[in-house]
Amino acid sequence: MNRESSYPESTVPNGPEDKQFLELQEMIRDLPDIDPPAVLAPSIMQQLTPRKRPFLRRISDFIRSRRTITFVPGQIVAAAACLLLFFSLGVWTGSENKESVPTLQKHVAPLMTDSRSGPALHYQMGRNLLVAGKPEQALPYFKQAAASSPDNPEYLFWKGVSHSALDEFDLERESYMKAISHAPDHSFASLYLGHNLMESGNYSEALRQYDRVLEIDPESLEASYNRGLVFAKMDKVREETLAWKSFLAGHQSGKWAIRAVDHLNSLGDFSFRTYQIGLRRIVARQTTFTPEGMVTPESIESLLRIGRASEHNTAMTLHLVTYVKNDIGEAKKRANNLKRVMTKHFPGASHRLKISWFNETEKIQIHDDLHSLDESVMIFGERNKKISI
């Protein structure tokens, strides 16, 4: 869920009252290979690179989401100075020369003991160390921030993230629960608590958390996808099928959509399918027809997505194949109507559309299971060196 940040615009102060900041800025400028910006964009501190972990730990919206911190007026100048400093520290911790880091931390220490700005600066230092891939060093800063402001859900949430990175799952869960107790609508705390609970085998509670996330943010990809995984763990086939269909109703692009289709098809449901169009696998609804053999309006959108993926590939023929068991006439009528729809929307590619029809079932092998579809549409792209018009 995207939320506007309440970070103030960072500015570069000037004048004798800003001597400490200017000294820190000069130190940063002296660091090799670093050119600190005059204005620190608020989004820089938000763009974390997640640690490479399994999907349930690393799927998140951290890179595209903005976090919220409330500043009191007395914090703004000190925070602006230290945001610039912490950004440079995040870059610097990845370089070979480490000698200046303790020196910079020594200059930051007085600001961190200031009761007005200390918790926020500890929080920023922790975030910056997470950027540098150092959760064991980040955790004490989050602990200090949370101890100073025990009702701040952001501090508690990120403390939980650090515990997670260190495989301290009980402490991780405790931090998320405390964050939720102070902010019931904190979607990320609920989401990550759901991940934690699922990995610990507490499936019912994990499902409750994912449902809560979807109440707060109906577009949450992670919560919607993981509901399907939870039902799979619980061996609830009907609920799992509905969960994958619900996910695909709102998400039909990207690798998780493809995986959701694979899960759904393995359960014997082919209301969504993937089609190989050149080098791409396109997720689409199974094409359906009216009693008169016309393409239904709800199928048009999926056909257009497939058409757009192939219309500019002049070296590819798009095959439209229909199956209707024991009714060759109906199969042919559907194939012709399919081509008519595609030609209407992609007239320049009409000569590269080829139709076929069969009065038999379509056979689909998934792992060790063979599925038979009495009525279906198969679409695929075939690359040709020479296309005849």
Image (cartoon, helix red, strand yellow):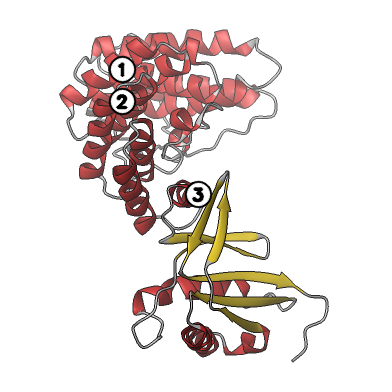
Amino acid identity at mark 2: Leu
Q: Identify the image quadrant of the N terminus.
A: top left
Residue identified by numbered label 1: 173
* Residue 151 figure quarter: top left
Q: Secondary structure at mark 3?
A: helix
- Is the residue 384 above or below the residue 116 in the image? below
Percent from the top left, x then y, of residue 209?
25, 32
Q: Quadrant of residue 357?
A: bottom right
Q: Nearer the viewer, mark 2 or mark 3?
A: 3
Helix, strand or loop for disc 2: helix
* Residue 168 as seen in the image, left or right of residue 1: right
Report the residue at 54% width, 86% height from top: 339
Q: Which residue extends farthest front? A: 326
Dot 1 amino acid type = Arg
Q: Secondary structure at mark 1?
A: helix
The residue singled out by tag 3 in the image is 262
* Residue 92 x, y percent position in the rendering: 61, 22
Q: Amino acid at mark 3?
A: Asp
Distance in Å between CA atoms under marks 1 and 3:
31 Å
Label 1 neighbour load within 10 Å: few <14, some 14-19, many 20+: many
Quickly name the residue at label 2. Answer: 193
How far is mark 2 from mark 1, CA to CA?
6 Å
* Residue 81 in the image, given as x and y percentages of width and height: 42, 26
Q: CA distance from mark 2 to mark 3?
A: 26 Å
Circle nearer the N terminus (2, 1): 1
Closer to us: 20 or 17: 20
- 2 and 1 marks in contact (CB < 8 Å): yes
Q: Residues within 10 Å of mark 3 (few under 14, many from 20)?
A: some
> Horizontal placement of 23 versus 280: left or right?
left
Q: Residue at x 48, y 74 (%)?
A: 325
